Image (tube, helix red, strand yellow):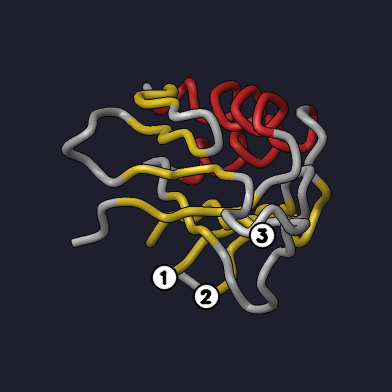
Amino acid sequence: MIGYVTIGVSDMEKAKAFYSDLLDDLDARVLLDMGRIAFIGQSMSAPMLAVCTPYDNEQNHPGNGNMVALQPGSKEAVDNLYQKAIKLGANCEGEPGQRLPDKFYGAYVRDPDGNKLAFFHFG
């Protein structure tokens, strides 16, 4: 149902590098780069993450309560994405851990532009 989620960034080159490096283990890459917006994913027919500079040329502002949640497939993959994000310059918003017993395992970061990301696994 979701085609793509867009987040605003202040530096396109930095954002493309951050997300390309972060998501390369999930076989994601920049699929389409249109200058002020780039689509990152596995294929154009699967859900993607888009990074863009705001259309109105104003500074980007992460939305309070907005978050992009990525499901890498296992608890170990959650841990790996969290550690990789931190190494790439993200800030911790919640270390990896079991949030709901036997139901939800997650970790939270903010990317270099302040956008909140969740890495999660059900179970």
Mark 1 → mark 2, Cα distance in angstroms: 5 Å
Residue lying furthest front: 56
Work out whether 63 lies above or below 106: below
Structural crowding at the residue carrying mark 2, measured as other residues with C-alpha within 10 Å and reported as few (<14), some (14–19) or many (≥20): few
Q: Amino acid under label 2? A: Leu
Q: Who's the residue at 69% across and 53% down the image?
A: 57
Residue on which the image places disc 2 = 100
Mark 1 → mark 3, Cα distance in angstroms: 21 Å
Callout 1–callout 2 Cβ contact below 8 Å: yes
Q: Regarding mark 2 in the picture, which secondary structure is present there?
A: strand
Q: Earlier in the sequence, mark 1 or mark 3?
A: 1
Work out whether 38 lies above or below 3: above
Q: Amino acid under label 1? A: Lys
Structural crowding at the residue carrying mark 3, measured as other residues with C-alpha within 10 Å and reported as few (<14), some (14–19) or many (≥20): many
Which of the two discs, 1 and 3, sits closer to the camera?
A: 3
Residue 92 picture location, percent across and down: 81, 52
Q: Who's the residue at 43% across and 44% down the image?
A: 49
Q: Regarding mark 3 in the picture, which secondary structure is present there?
A: strand
Residue 30 picture location, percent across and down: 43, 23
- Among the 4 quarters of the image, the one containing residue 85: top right
Residue 69 picture location, percent across and down: 48, 58
Residue 103, label in figure:
1
Mark 2 → mark 3, Cα distance in angstroms: 20 Å
Q: Report the label total.
A: 3
Q: Regarding mark 1 in the picture, which secondary structure is present there?
A: loop
Q: Amino acid under label 3? A: Lys
Which of the two discs, 2 and 3, sits closer to the camera?
A: 3
Q: Is residue 82 left or right of residue 26?
A: right
Q: Who's the residue at 35% across and 24% down the image?
A: 31
Q: Who's the residue at 66% across and 72% down the image?
A: 63
Residue on which the image places disc 3 = 116
Pick the quarter of the image with the N terminus.
bottom left
